[in-house]
Image (cartoon, rainbow, N blue to C red):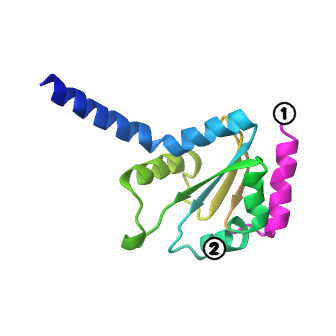
Amino acid sequence: MKTIFSTLFLVVFSVVFHAQNRWEDAKKIAAEKNELILLNFSGSDWCIPCIKLHKNIIETDDFKKLETDNVIVYLNADFPRNKKNQLSAELKKENATLADQYNQKGIFPYTILLNSEGKILKSWEGLISSDALAFSKEIREMKDNQKP
């Protein structure tokens, strides 16, 4: 009986722990490397502005350079609707928790720049109006203005 209880406890604990893994990892990496966190809420298979944001900004070399230059840790909280694009239960739960904390109005796309403690530094509602280079420059300037 002890073995069954112990196994059940470990399974439940690992699911709960894993559900917050990406967010906790992002905060840890951001703190260790003095980076910011860019959290993007998207509907990857139904939200046209979200799709445009990913194509025109997030998938560009200018944006990706923010990650490789240790400026940001990027985290996408996706809410797909099509059955074939559904996320794992753990990822759905984590995204819902992030939405409860940072996107209570359910805006898509919604992009937030946070410090390593989760404090909001800036947010963008809807499709970002600047191009990838200007957006990346704005984020770099905000990071440069942060106290180490």
- In the image, residue 59 lies at what x, y percent? 68, 68
Q: Earlier in the sequence, mark 1 or mark 2?
A: 2
Say left or right for 102 vs 88: right
Q: Which residue is mark 1?
A: 147
Query: Relative to residue 119, is residue 86 depicted above or below?
Result: below
User: Which mark identifies residue 34?
Assistant: none
Q: Name the amino acid type tagged 2.
A: Pro
Q: Which part of the image, by quadrant, shows the C terminus?
A: top right
- In the image, residue 44 lies at what x, y percent? 53, 69
- In the image, residue 12 lies at what x, y percent? 30, 36
Picture residue at 65% right of the left edge, 69% below the top: 54
Q: Which part of the image, by quadrant, shows the N terminus?
A: top left
Q: How many marks?
A: 2
Q: Which stretch did the figure color magenta?
A: 127-148
- In the image, residue 132 lies at what x, y percent? 79, 67
Q: What is the crowding at mark 2: few (fewer than 14 residues within 10 Å), some, or many (at least 20)?
A: some
Q: Which residue is mark 2?
A: 49
Q: Nearer the viewer, mark 1 or mark 2?
A: 1
Picture residue at 36% right of the left edge, 41% below the top: 15
Q: What is the crowding at mark 1: few (fewer than 14 residues within 10 Å), some, or many (at least 20)?
A: few
Residue 13 within the segment the image draws in magenta:
no
Q: Secondary structure at mark 2?
A: helix
Residue 140 within the segment the image draws in magenta:
yes
